[in-house]
Amino acid sequence: MKKFLIVLSFVFIGYASQAQELGIRLGNVTGGSAAVDGLFSLGKFSRVHANVSFGSGLGIEALWDFLYKPLDNEAFHWYVGAGPSLLIDDPFKLGVAGEIGLGYYFKGVPISLSADWRPTFVLVEKTSMDWGGFGVNVRYVFNKK
């Protein structure tokens, strides 16, 4: 199992090197309280927000933020999305997470800061609803102009 986790980590880091933003997520994260966090653009107003955590097992989430819009000021953005949530541990968990959040891009510095809420509907191994999922994300923004 450890070899599998190591290989999966390298695959994620390799894929994350294509990310537009890469950093950490702190808070209530699937599988722990911290995760590697990345954003992958799918267009001007759409993106994938993914993270991998190593704590209580291996937690993986990949949420499609289908609404990603600036507020009045270009520095603030809000987003809404959903996607799969997976915890490889005992007990195994597979579900669907929703996401709503607010992000801020610092002017002149390639750093973004965001806070979001991710309620999760767990389907497998035991059906339940997790209303936690509050987190703070700090990421480095690649190729910021």
Image: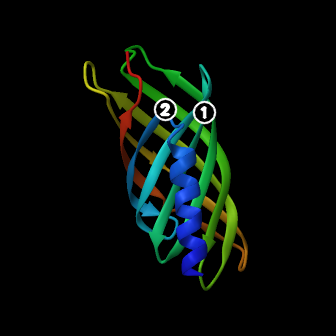
Above/below status of 65 relative to 43: below
Residue 70 % position (x, y): 47, 20
Amino acid type, residue under disc 1 in the picture: Arg
Residue 52 % position (x, y): 51, 59
Q: Tell me, yes or no, if residue 119 can be seen here.
A: no
Say few, some or many: other residues with alpha carbon within 10 Å of mark 2 (under 14 / 14 to 19 / 20 or more).
some
Amino acid type, residue under disc 2 in the picture: Gln
**Quadrant of res 96:** bottom right
Q: Residue 20 carries which label?
A: 2
User: Is 73 in front, or is 22?
Assistant: 22
**Quadrant of res 94:** bottom right
Check whether the beta carbons of the residues at disc 1 and disc 2 lie within 8 A of each other.
yes
Secondary structure of residue under mark 1: strand
Q: In this view, does 2 lie to the left or right of 33?
A: right
Above/below status of 6 relative to 110: below
The residue mark sitting in front, 1 or 2, is 2
Above/below status of 6 relative to 38: below
Residue lying furthest bottom: 90
Query: Residue placed at 59% from the left, 19% from the top?
Result: 44
User: Is 79 in front, or is 31?
Assistant: 31
Above/below status of 57 relative to 68: below
Task: Determine the CA span between mark 1 and mark 2.
Answer: 10 Å
Query: Which residue, given by chain and number where applicable, does mark 1 sit on?
Result: 47
Quadrant into which the C terminus falls: top left
The mark that comes first in sequence, 1 or 2, is 2
Query: Residue placed at 41% from the left, 29% from the top?
Result: 142
